[in-house]
Image (cartoon, rainbow, N blue to C red):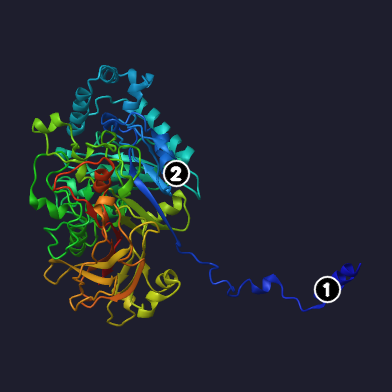
Amino acid sequence: MLRLRLALRTGLLLLLLPCTSISAFADSESYSPYAGEDYPRNVYFGDTHVHSSWSADAANTGNRQIDPEAAYRFARGEEITAHNGMRVRLRRPLDFMLLSDHAEYLGVMEMLDSEDPALLKTEVGRRWADFRKTGRNMQLITEFGMSLLQNVDLIDSPELERTVWSRVVQNAERWNEPGRFTAFIGYEWTSTPGAKNLHRNVIFADGAALTSQIVPHSALLDPTPESLWRFMAAYEERTGGSALAIPHNSNLSGGLMFALRDSSGRAIDADYAAARARWEPLVEASQYKGDSEAHPLLSPNDEFADYETWDRSSTSSADYDPSWLEAEYVRPALENGLRVERDVGVNPFKFGLIGSTDAHTGMAAADEDNYWGKTSASEPSATRWSNGLFPKELVESGGGAQYYEWEMTASGYAGIWARENTRQALFDAMRRRETFATTGPRMTVRFFGGFDFRAADASHPDLPRVGYEKGVPMGGDLTAGDMGGEDRAPAFLVAALRDPVGANLDRIQIVKGWVNSDGETRERIYDVAVSDGRKIGRGGRAKQAVGSTVDIGNTSWTNTIGAAALSVHWQDPDFDPEQRAFYYARVIEIPKPRWTAYDRRYFEIEMSDEVPLTTQDRAYTSPIWYTP
């Protein structure tokens, strides 16, 4: 009874106190500093380049069981069984994935094995099914490969294409779980003129309602990138949806990927540049078939440029010309983009950076201690390190240069800064280039540029808030108008946190490229933050190496060197407000064992001296551009 009286008196007292209505605060600033916040606070890691058994080349190189369902299960963190009978699982699930099976003969090999009626209606389908049954895979591979090189669709069945694409769309819909795991709908467009790589991965922001209205545009219909851009434009106009394309393996393009001419051989004009910038806002800078960020011959003053470099051929072609390099690597392409922009008014190579795997096993594995090979034929074994990527018969017949499994890179993943883990939010972030590439580790990297940053901002407890309020994030633009009428050099905030279960950080660098007054491209590397108290000299470089704690015999290292986190404010000491420029951050880890060292220990084998056993994984942010 006493409690009841007290409650009644308390309630009466509250009624008699002055009342402030909720509406009184409606138009005032909230006590919560996060109310109305509209910038990305979350980083998501994933892979936009994975092939299942539904890709013809994957199936022809041994993938007979890791179908789309198994690939999605693996990406989401489930344990599956590989072709070698071993169980395999990711240490941590991915946040998103594009199952990018090739548009060319999409799903055909799986349909051959299952004797799908839609395929067996065709003459070529029946012949290829017989090849599979009788073990004549080399004949099948030869026919398949020649059709790609000659741009001839041997099956040419619209009914088959619609059937397979509807299955691709439904597979992605079934595994897409907004907020937990994003399954993008898309495919790989595989143009290979003269065995030179012009491949792109096509990603749609949309679900089944829109993507079911089309079938993939195959390179067998038209191998020029311009045709792919027209297809995406038609898709958006027809459906109201959104699409983009991501080039990959520019390092194997034979000087074509970032050439200064279009597919007809004409010099890049404003229309071409605008179309390319519109439809290709990203580039895959690192994957299993090598790293494409920089090349040591083009960047001789960059001691970190020779990272997992492939430069003996273009894809499987036996031809090789060093003059191709400038049009094959990301950094010189970014530099040439500035020069083209100066001449025609639009930058065709204004792209952000991501990494992905290009796994043909269906398993998106990019960790050094959990690498499962480029193809199912190169899953972990005592002999895989010396296996060739291309069929021995093809190479011996003069059909190409060979690459070996030990040359494969356990790389990489895409880091995306987005508001939530949904198709639309991730797609929007890719469109605005708020992305970074990692060669495997899930390190967290922030990069902002502006004219109002101060040194204290680098140690602010909420650095992203400062970064967005005073500047632009990776992928953004700065102009002379942002200086506020003053002649000031841009400043940058960079913050990096190591992978929580990975190696410490060696250093943060800023890579600058620009066009001088003579129209020549230039570049420079600045060490802006280094670990362990090392000094950065007047030239902006820390020449002292971080050292190494790697024990190859035990495939181990310790985080007794390096730093768990690095952050810095840096202002360009060589800024010229009249010169176009770009800046991006590169974050380097301390040395650790490479995947080959794990094979060497697990299988108790010896490898030839040319095989590297250590690595320094890294991340590359998308650039920030300055325009006079």
- Kindly identify the residue that appears in the image at 12 percent across and 33 percent down: 395
Q: Is residue 468 above or below residue 130?
A: below
Q: Position of residue 519 (x, y in %)?
A: 13, 67
Residue designated by label 2: 76
In space, the residues marked 1 and 2 are separated at their CA atoms by 53 Å
Q: Position of residue 446 (x, y in %)?
A: 37, 65
Q: Is residue 49 above or below residue 396?
A: below
* Residue 602 lies in quadrant: top left
Query: Is residue 433 in sight in this rendering?
Result: no
Q: Residue furthest right?
A: 1
Residue designated by label 1: 10
What amino acid is labelled 1 in the image?
Answer: Thr
Quadrant, the C terminus: bottom left
Q: Earlier in the sequence, mark 1 or mark 2?
A: 1
Q: Position of residue 497 (x, y in %)?
A: 37, 64
Q: Is residue 590 above or below residue 101?
A: below
Left or right, 65 with reference to 423: left
**What's the mark number on residue 306?**
none
Q: Is residue 50 above or below residue 39?
A: above
Numbered disc 1: secondary structure: helix
Numbered disc in front, either 1 or 2: 2
Q: Residues within 10 Å of mark 1 (few under 14, many from 20)?
A: few
What amino acid is labelled 2 in the image?
Answer: Arg
* Residue 381 lies in quadrant: top left
- Kindly identify the residue that appears in the image at 26 percent across and 67 percent down: 509
